[in-house]
Amino acid sequence: MNMPIRLLALLMIWHAPAFTQEAKLTIHLDDMKILRQIAKHEDLNLSPDVNPMGWPLKAGEKGMRFSSNENPRHALTVVYDQQGRVTKLLGNGPLLCNDALIWVAGLPELRVIRIDHNIPAPGSKTPHEKYDGSGFAALSTSKLENVRIGHAFDDRGMAALASVASLRALDICHSKATDEGIAYFAKHPNLEEFSISSQGRPNRVTDKALSAIATISKLKRLNLHETFLTYEGGLKHLAQLKGQLLAISFKGSLVLPADVEKLRRDHPSLEVVTSTPTEILEAPNSRGVMKWASPAAVEYLKTGEKK
């Protein structure tokens, strides 16, 4: 009877390292301290759900989620690596105020911040300027590569993000950023993909931004959504990126077909995505472009009206 017991013990010892390694796969204590500081500030549950399923986690990612007991959409999902260091902060809701971004600078392996609806909740007494993104200045020497943020985010946030030299992909969604904010990214050393949507609001993102965008030497993909653009007013500047720019999207944007053809002549192999007049008129965030479009563009847009 002793032999089977000894054999079982040996087998348990043989497999122990695997179980021990799995048990150690958790967030580094220093990173956890920062996460709990953010969660407390945002009234999230300080006891996170370990390895939650579904959005925004991708298959194979290890993570945890700090959620709100009152609003399940208000949550911060965290992805971490084999050493327990946080690599991604993902979520939906008012999660990263400027103070929190300063704390986030203490996460040494952070690569991605993608937060939808980064704005105080309706009726909140929290000033929007606390979420304007200026706190990104604390990450200027970080390893941050990919950022998606919007809403209360404005040109002060753009200036701060432009100082992050490691940034490779930027998506500014329905924010208060303007042409002046985009100008801060002129000659950015590493940006390869830039996306911004103006939500059809006049004089936020216009042709004027393209002269600065054209100086981003490594830019490969450009998405200019929900705005009005012309070739002579700005798209002609992109000729500086001939042979380098791979794709451009005008989804929800009003661009006359003749101007699109001029752009294609400058970039024969460029992948271009456009929206039809009907698609623009049917999208609440796009149809406002007619407020500042040229008379010719407005007439073209009207061809999409249902009879």
Image: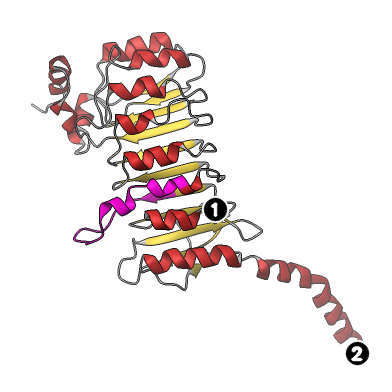
Q: Which of the 4 image quadrants contains residue 27?
A: bottom right
The residue at the far right in this view is 3
Q: Is residue 106 above or below residue 305?
A: below
Q: Which of the 4 image quadrants contains residue 8?
A: bottom right
Counting other residues with Cα less than 10 Å from the Cα at mark 1, is it few (<14), some (14-19), or many (20 or more)?
A: few
State yes or no: residue 119 in magenta. Answer: yes
Percent across and percent down for residue 272 are 38, 21
Q: Which residue is mark 1?
A: 59
Helix, strand or loop at label 1? It is: loop
Q: Is residue 214 above or below residue 63?
A: above
Q: Which of 208 and 284 lies nearest the eye of the viewer?
A: 208
Helix, strand or loop at label 2? It is: helix
| Residue at (39% x, 38% y) in the render | 159
| Residue at (57% x, 44% y) in the render | 143
Magenta stretch, residue numbers: 114-137
Q: Can I make out residue 123 in this image?
A: yes
Q: Which of 268 and 37 lies nearest the eye of the viewer?
A: 37
In the shown orientation, is residue 219 left or right of residue 226? Answer: right
Check disc 2 and give the amino acid type: Asn
Q: Which of 46 and 132 lies nearest the eye of the viewer?
A: 132
